Image (cartoon, rainbow, N blue to C red):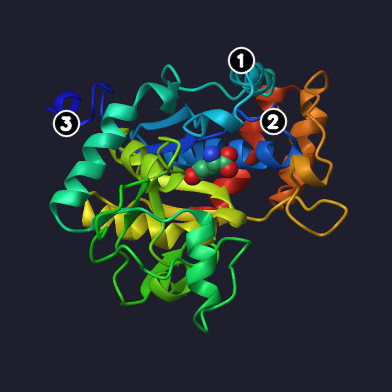
Amino acid sequence: MFAARNGGLSRKISEYVGRFAPSPTGPLHAGSLVAALSSWLDARAWELSHPGARSSWLVRMEDVDQPRCIPGADRIILQQLADCGLVSDEPPVWQSQRTDRYQAALERLLARGAAYPCACSRKDVAQALAATRAPRPRHGELIYPGTCRHGLKGKSARSWRFATPAAAVLWTDRRLGVQQQHVNAEVGDFVLKRADGCFAYQLAVVVDDADQGVTHVVRGADLADNTPRQLLLQRALKLPTPQYLHTPLVLGADGEKLSKQNGAKPLHTRDPLAALNAAAATLGLPPAVGSVGEALQAWVRAWADCWR
Ligand code: GLU
């Protein structure tokens, strides 16, 4: 039954399912190793604190935004992870092979009136906003004014958007505590399928987490802001909500989250213990010596003391 419901991703059911979901837009950098390590430690620490229980840690290649992906980066990422002793418990999944599942979810949302086609280009959105006293762009993204919410008025659909409900979304992060976001006012009706035909990260991640039976999401704090959109999609699609833990970030010289744009260099895993120790320090874990395996085991115990 599980295999039939989850779009062909079949496996034994674990009590804890975690995942690391890199976008193969380049090799891993120091910041992405923090997300990989923390999600792996959380899965393994679960077994320590639940004797007899089984956890799974999965790797999912988030290559849904094909134009941004770099050929071969997925292979390099898997090698970097393996060098650091972080190996997926199941064969990795590539989002680019799962577009049927995203389309099916979009159709369910459309059938429930929770999504709608949109004819607006970026220019149309900017012009509509300029004509009103609309809120300023958020992270450079224009907050959609809802032009097509009640119909295309004879125009052709370019993209598909989620009809965000008016109520605020409240949720509790394991590290950050109670969080709140008025998605409708602060983000607006966000895109589910873009004009170039690519499905948006928000929809893909929700469908994948549910299909893979993910119970715990551990990822960088830069993504905390996306969680309310994902909660809304889970509710609209009647999917379960995992527990979330958003970890501290590695910052670049400009004080922003480390990224390729602000000089993140590809992670060198010739000395995996050095790379892992740097990631562990960001997570507040003590330095470790010995082999990679010994270091990981020491951090699993420390993580279990802290987070379990
Ligand atoms: N693919 C996203 C990234 O690399 C992570 C998504 C997630 O963990 O939900 O930033």
- Identified at 30% across, 47% down, the residue is 156
Q: How far is mark 1 from mark 3, CA to CA?
A: 29 Å
Are the residues flagged by discs 2 and 3 in contact, CB closer than 8 Å? Answer: no
Q: Is residue 289 visible?
A: no
Q: Quadrant of residue 228?
A: bottom left
Q: Is residue 72 above or below residue 236?
A: above
Residue 172: give its label: none
Q: Is residue 8 above or below residue 143?
A: above
Mark 2: which amino acid?
Leu
Return the disc, 2 or 3, that comes first in the chain's sequence: 3
Counting from the top left corner in percent of width and height, residue 185 is at 43, 76
- Name the outermost residue toward the front: 154
Judge from the rendering whether residue 277 lies leftward or rightward of residue 85; answer left or right: right
Dot 3: few (<14), some (14–19), or many (≥20) neighbours within 10 Å?
few
- Identified at 21% across, 50% down, the residue is 109
Return the disc, 1 or 3, that comes first in the chain's sequence: 3
Judge from the rendering whether residue 283 lies leftward or rightward of residue 49; answer left or right: right
Mark 3: which amino acid?
Arg
Counting from the top left corner in percent of width and height, residue 81 is at 63, 23
153 or 263: nearer the eye? Answer: 153
Q: Quadrant of ligand 1?
A: top right
Q: Secondary structure at mark 1?
A: helix
- Identified at 17% across, 45% down, the residue is 108
127 or 244: nearer the eye? Answer: 127
Residue 5: give its label: 3
116 or 158: nearer the eye? Answer: 158
Return the disc, 2 or 1, that comes first in the chain's sequence: 2
Dot 1: few (<14), some (14–19), or many (≥20) neighbours within 10 Å?
few
Question: According to the image, label 2 marks what residue?
Answer: 28
Question: According to the image, label 1 marks what residue?
Answer: 75
Dot 2: few (<14), some (14–19), or many (≥20) neighbours within 10 Å?
many
